[in-house]
Amino acid sequence: MEKRIGVIGIFIQNRCAAAAAVNDILSEYADIIVGRMGLPYKERGVNVISLIIEASTDQVGAMTGRLGQLDNVKVKSMLV
């Protein structure tokens, strides 16, 4: 399958409840992650993780699907 470059935004509302699960999933997909940046946004009570990825659409769908099933986690992706 063709690999594409993309950006994934992950928004975590309850860090204590979801951070470990998010990190476990990201570790499983470490081979497609080119870069990662995480920022706490305390004023809004949310933590934001941005990923630069190089992957097939199937890989992106699998990872974002698993992340999106977690409580207090929202995921958006864009591929070019």
Image: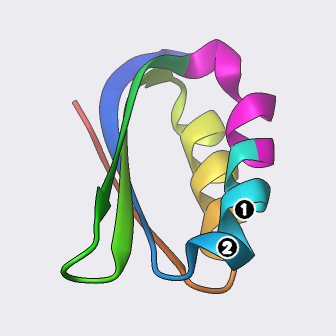
Instruction: Name the N-terminal-most of marks 2 and 1.
Output: 2
54 on left or right of 65: left
Q: How is the image coloured?
A: rainbow
Amino acid beneath label 2: Cys
Query: Is 26 included in the stretch rendered in magenta?
Result: yes
Q: Which residue is mark 2?
A: 16
Q: Main secondary structure of the magenta part?
A: helix
Position of residue 34 measured from the top left corner of the image (x, y, whole percent): 44, 13
25 on left or right of 13: right
Position of residue 16 measured from the top left corner of the image (x, y, whole percent): 67, 73
Q: Which residue is mark 1?
A: 66
Q: Quadrant of the C terminus?
A: top left
Residue at 22% in and 83% down: 44
Residue at 52% in and 37% down: 57
Q: Which residues are magenta?
A: 24-32
Q: Is residue 55 above or below residue 67?
A: above
